[in-house]
Image: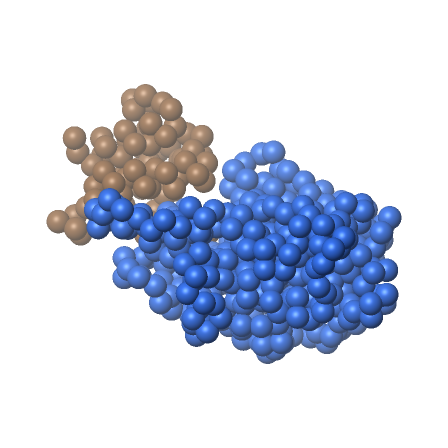
Chain colours: A brown, B blue
Amino acid sequence: MNVREKVIEIIAEQAVLDPSDVKPEHTLEDLGIDSLGLVESIFAIEEAFDISVPFNANAPEESEFDISSVEAIICAVTGLVSQQA
Amino acid sequence: MRRVVITGAGTINALGHDVPTTLEAMREGRCGIGPLDIRDVDRLAVKIGGQVKGFDETEHFNRQQIALYDRFTQFTVLAARQAMAQSGLEFRGALADRSGVVLGTSGGGLTTQDENYRVVYEEGKNRVHPFIVPKLMNNAAASHVSMEWNLRGPSFTVATACASSNHAMGLAFQMIRSGMADAMITGGSESMLVFGGVKAWEGLRVMSKDACRPFCATRNGMVQGEGAGVFVFEEYEAARARGAEILAEVVGFAMSSDASDIVMPSKQGAARAIAGALADARLDRGQVGYINAHGTGTAANDKTECAAVADVFGTHADRLMISSTKSMHGHLIGGTGAVELLACIMALRDGVIAPTINYEEPDPECALDVVPNEAREADVDVVLSNAFAFGGLNAVLALRKAE
């Protein structure tokens, strides 16, 4: 499973949706994921890829990790995974 | 209804090991937050806290006591000694039977838990010290205080996360006011600055890695502290009859539940508790001169709290002062309201309003007089102390200047 599929799977599970219903352009808000769902998703991503995601719930917009859409999250995770490799 | 006054106060926290040192630090706007000195700190992402420094348990307790007192109990007993010495009260006979201990804590003996999980899980040992349970239980501190000063009436521990000690003190107040008890030792304690305690908070991603900056546009989260605040609450006529020094009068208390979210605060829940405390004290909102804020320095709390204050006080919200001393001593979780009550006493008795330090730039969503960076002299008659816990459990106390 590649990064894209895995991230979508994690987000879909959090949103209680089928992965096929999660589109790259969706925001987390579109998917009904709240602040707790977000930190849980980030935790799941960290565990799945063995990476550390720079994210502070107090200032999401200032975090280096872009969460503005599913596509943005996939890009950010891809970046972190490649840095680690 | 009977009146309730505070006749003794004690504390140990990151700002000082007693009340005068703590109040001096608050007056000077000193910061007690710094690098954490705990085991495995290199494995933490959050490496700062309001840690109690220079504390040697062997200076205060004997070997048997240390074997039974977790750090949170040590903090409590130390603060209770100071409060009892100041009050001059002794619990004997009928007074002992009608006096008790209500304390707040969230984590209880977390140091003991952390150390002993290491022993069995990390080190793989199959034997632990026999006193782990009496040491870690949340009521250990309340029980040791009752034993040391012979309080034989109603005693228990309250755990409502960040509102624990405000709930505890509010209940102690109500118990004396209603005639159920004549004197109470109350307040709270917390000692969560251990690897597991900080790691758990880290997971929630609401902690700051550099500083606690409540109400400031650049705030980026809370910083944990540790310590205790303990008070002697007493029925007013009895305190006056024995010539006790009255530090302040407790005049109102209200609790509310948001009934909405396990971590996100609610403006309505906070506002109901603030308005409830005023109504309970039969105070007009215009009488309130200062509010010791919950002011955690998280994005969510500070704007919600300011909106709740604006809602309750209307135009008077712009005339009152509101500060968060957590910027100096950190968030003591279950003990925080007790240490913050000291700032309320300082405001009423000494006419000094503790500042919100680390304040850099205004946040339009927190547009109140937050007493930035420097303490202020002001004559205030009535103050409030806010506490809004995770889980949406709110507790607000109202205090008035001693007559």
Residue B330 vertical position relative to residue B271 in the rendered view, above or below: below
How far across and how far down the image is residue B187, in percent? 62, 56
Query: In terms of depth relative to the viewer, which is nearer, B249 or B214?
Result: B249
Query: In terms of depth relative to the viewer, which is nearer, B263 or B155?
Result: B155
Q: Residue at x 66, y 70 (%)?
A: B85
Q: Residue at x 77, y 45 (%)?
A: B180
Q: Residue at x 24, y 44 (%)?
A: B126
Residue B319 vertical position relative to residue B53 in the rendered view, above or below: above
* Residue B394 sits in quarter: top right
Query: In terms of depth relative to the viewer, which is nearer, B63 or B51?
Result: B63
Specify whether B271 is left or right of B249.
left
Q: Residue at x 71, y 54 (%)?
A: B96
Query: In terms of depth relative to the viewer, which is nearer, B67 or A61?
Result: B67
Looking at the figure, which quarter contains the C terminus of chain B?
bottom right
* Residue B121 sits in quarter: top left
> Which residue sits furthest left?
A85
How far across and how far down the image is residue B82, in percent? 62, 69
How far across and how far down the image is residue B310, in percent? 71, 52
Camera sees residue A23: yes
How far across and how far down the image is residue B141, in percent? 53, 54
Specify whether B182 is left or right of B81.
right
